[in-house]
Image (cartoon, rainbow, N blue to C red):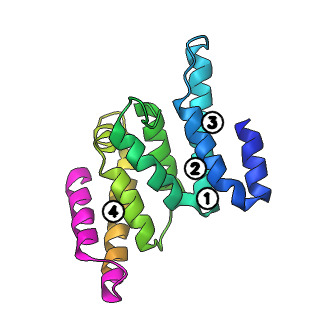
Amino acid sequence: ILSLVRIISTHHPYARPDALKLAFTFLKHSPADMLYKKISALKEQGVRLLLWLMTKGQAVAVFDTLTPKLKKGSGSGGSGMDSANLRYFVAGALDIMQPPLSVPLVRSMGACLSTNSCIDVLCSSHFDAEKKKSLVKMLGHFRRTIEEGLKDERACMEDMTMVSSLKSVYA
């Protein structure tokens, strides 16, 4: 189903918000009668759909949808992402995203990286050291984007505070 959603979204860009909703539905879905391996595979496909949507211009929407779900935690309304899938998602996002970045993207991803779920997962020893270096490098790009945004008032000092806070957490 998720592969079909990807194909449909390729040819019908206005279906991408629905694809985003469906990806999160699959991430939260864990039927008791299904094998753990099968559930894990479905969730991984959901994460890959989120990453694919990011490559199609939906990065801000993906992060804006994920952030409140991460803040709610693993209970009702949570993201449905376990630690491994969250690491996989962030690592994939770091591979996809390249400067120049927009101020809305920095705000959106920064809010996501500021959640306790992300901090716990990305500061653990299970997060690849090379990816951690990529994360710190991306935070440098965040800083440059916000500095440029401050010049023409697309960004504000709260944005710089957020980036500085992220830098102190992940550096």
Task: Return the mark for residue 45.
Answer: 3
Residue most extreme to the front = 76
Eye-nearest disc, 4 or 3:
3
User: Label 2 vs label 3: CA separation?
Assistant: 10 Å
Quarter-wise, where is residue 16 in the image? Answer: bottom right
Q: Secondary structure at mark 1?
A: helix
Specify whether residue 133 is in view: no
Q: Earlier in the sequence, mark 4 or mark 3?
A: 3
Q: Is residue 117 magenta?
A: no
Tell me the quadrant of the picture where the C terminus can be found. bottom left
- 7 vs 105, left or right, is right
Q: Residue at x 73, y 44 (%)?
A: 5
Residue most extreme to the bottom = 152
Q: Secondary structure at mark 2?
A: helix
User: Label 4 vs label 3: CA separation?
Assistant: 27 Å
Bounds of the magenta segment: 148-171
Q: Amino acid at mark 1?
A: Thr
* Residue 147 in picture, x, y percent from top left: 30, 79
Task: Return the mark for residue 139.
Answer: 4
Eye-nearest disc, 2 or 4:
2
Q: Amino acid at mark 3?
A: Gln
Q: Secondary structure at mark 3?
A: helix
- 148 vs 37, left or right, is left
Task: Return the mark for residue 51.
Answer: 2
Q: Amino acid at mark 2?
A: Leu
Question: Is 18 located above or below residue 83 in the figure?
Answer: below
Q: Earlier in the sequence, mark 2 or mark 3?
A: 3
* Residue 124 in picture, x, y percent from top left: 29, 36
